[in-house]
């Protein structure tokens, strides 16, 4: 299932890696596409959206 999140606070490549790794710790098969300029993260994963959002938030980013 594909979910799109608005994520604030991503400013660099390290941020992108942190978000990607957080999602892939929940679901190793997940694909993560990040548009840092627009603060958009698209995740294709079998995990529920609330768990994905919580994992991203746990890295210190604001998720909407």
Image (spheres, helix red, strand yellow):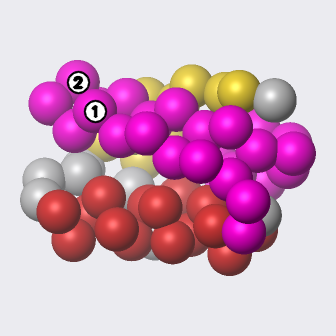
Residue underneath mark 2: 38
The spot of residue 28 in percent (x, y) is: 72, 69
Image-quadrant location for residue 45: top right
Q: Residue at x 13, y 53 (%)?
A: 11
Disc 1, SS: strand
**Residue 3 appearing in the image:** yes
Asked if residue 60 can be seen in this view, the reply is no
Q: Is residue 23 left or right of residue 40?
A: right
Compared to 36, does 9 lie above or below? below
Q: Secondary structure at mark 2?
A: helix
Instruction: Please identify, in this view, whether the residue under mark 1 or under mark 2 is nearer the observer.
Output: 1
User: Which quadrant: the N terminus?
Assistant: top right
Q: Residues within 10 Å of mark 2 (few under 14, many from 20)?
A: few
Nearest the eye: 20 or 8 = 20
- Residue count near mark 1 (Cα–Cα under 10 Å), binned few <14, some 14–19, many ≥20: few
Residue 60 point in image, percent of width and height: 40, 66
Could you tell whether 40 is left or right of 57 in the image? left
- Tell me where the magenta segment starts and ends, as one range: 28-55
Cβ atoms under marks 1 and 2 closer than 8 Å: yes
Q: Is 18 in front, or is 6? A: 18
Residue under label 1: 35
| Residue 53 in the image, given as x and y percentages of width and height | 64, 48
> Magenta segment: does it hold 10?
no
| Residue at 15% in and 30% down | 37
In three-dimensional space, the C-alpha distance between marks 1 and 2, rounded to whole angstroms, equals 6 Å
Q: How many marks?
A: 2
Q: Does residue 46 appear left or right of residue 63 in this picture?
A: right
């Amino acid at each position: 299932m594909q979910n799109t999140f608005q994520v604030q606070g991503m400013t660099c490549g390290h941020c992108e890696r942190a978000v990607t790794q957080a999602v892939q710790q929940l679901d190793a098969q997940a694909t993560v596409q990040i548009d840092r300029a627009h603060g958009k993260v698209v995740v294709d994963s079998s995990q529920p959206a609330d768990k994905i959002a919580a994992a991203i938030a746990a890295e210190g980013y604001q998720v909407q």
